[in-house]
Each structure stands twice: as C-alpha cells, then as structure tokens.
Image (cartoon, grey):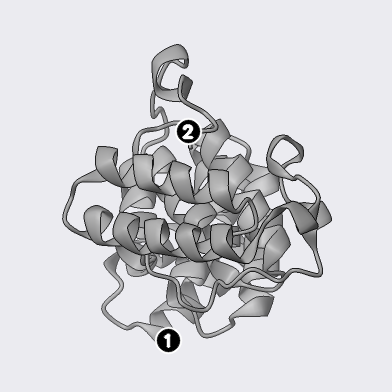
Amino acid sequence: MASPCPERGLTRRRLIWRQPFALALMGITLCGCSFDLGSLMPEKDKPQEAPKAAAPAESAVSPGNVAEAQAHTAKAQSLAKSGETAAALDEFNRAVGLDPYNAQALYGRALIYQANHQHDFAIADFSAASGLNPQKAEPLLGRATSYLALGKIKEAAADLDEASEADPHNAQVWTTRGQAYERLGDKAKAAASYTRAVALRPRDDTARSGLARVGG
C-alpha cells in the first residue's frame, strides 16, 4: 500500500532549532525512548483518538492487515535501530496505512519525524499514539520535546505534568519538565523537577546543571 504521507519529506521545510538546548532535547528523545515499545499496543476501545485523516471504521481493519502491519512495524524498528531511518520510515508508513491504530508504528514514525525536525508531523503521530494508549509517558514526552523545539513551552509543560504522573520514576520526564519550567521562568517547579531527576539518576548532567542554574 502506498504511503499515507508520501510528500511530507518533500513539501515541508525543515524547522530550524533556535533554542540553546534543542540538541540536548533531541538526544533525550532518541536515546531515552526506544523504537521498540512493547508496552504501546493499540487499545481498540479508543479509535476516536486517532488522527482523522487515518481513522477508517474499525471494522475496516482486518486481522490480516493488523498482522501485516505488525510485521512492517517490526522490520521498521530493526531498520531504525541500525540507523536506516529512511527505510524505517517507509516501513512505518506501510504499517500505519494497513492499521491506523498501530501505536508502535505511530510512535516510531514520530521519532523519525522528530529527528528530521518535522515537528508538526511528529506531534500528530505522538498525539495519535497517546490517544491509543492513555497514561503512557513515552508519547507525552516525545510530543513535549517537539513542542519545546517549536517554542510551545506551555503545551510542553502540560504534557510533562501528565507524563510525570503517568510514570513518576522516569528520570527523563523530570529532566525535560525541568527544562520546560525553566524556560517558563518558574524556578521553583524547575528546581523540583531537576531535583527529582537527579534523585532518580544521579549522573544526569543535564539535570544537575539545570539545578545549578535555577538555584536548587
């Protein structure tokens, strides 16, 4: 099946990172989140949360399509881990085309879009993955990172608040939350977030330097 978004990489200009720690944020997402998220399995009771452009009636997704989509997703994850992101993106596109409720494919595709600075597309896929899997921290963290790259700090902070509740032991969430609140000028929340991150991961240099900046 043809890719549902064949012209995205050709018709959109890549967004330029303007924030001083944008590269650090990208490292957080790509290094802290795996393409192979076994816990992100689609929840069929929430199809309304999927993107409108890729949300046919659930009955239209046959068991055969679901199985084939899972195979494409597994192949895409393997390619992505090997650094073959262009080929991985093609496989994720095939998977989503076959099964728009495949949260693993949506999440993996979002990470690739994010790495390519295509943050609007990344946000759409992170949102779909999050809608299919409420209370999972990883899609919220991914979406927050793209929001930060676009300068949408309040939106990022809201996602990170939710992510910290969903997974309070995720040091990456607390570090990124500290960055968001630091940029909002809320030193108290930034310090609290960085402190939590350091408690969970003492060698987190980003959190430690952030804590020093905000006076924690």
> As drawn, is 205 to the left or to the right of 140?
left
Q: Nearer the viewer, residue 65 or 82?
A: 65
Q: Position of residue 157 (x, y in %)?
A: 65, 54
Could you say which quadrant of the image residue 205 lies in? bottom left
Identity of the residue drawn at 69% across and 46% down? 155
Up/down of 105 relative to 70, above or below:
above
Give me the residue at 58% from left, 46% from top. 125
| Mark 2 nearby-residue class (10 Å; few <14, some 14–19, many ≥20) | some
Res 179 visible: no
Instruction: Name the residue carrying label 2.
Output: 3
| Residue linked to disc 1 | 199
Label 1 crowd (10 A; few <14 / some 14-19 / many >=20): some
Most distant residue in the left direction: 82
Q: Position of residue 148 (x, y in %)?
A: 53, 42
- Left or right: 153 in relation to 17: right
**Residue 201: quarter of image:** bottom left
Q: Position of residue 74 (x, y in %)?
A: 35, 64
- Nearer to me, 139 or 163: 139
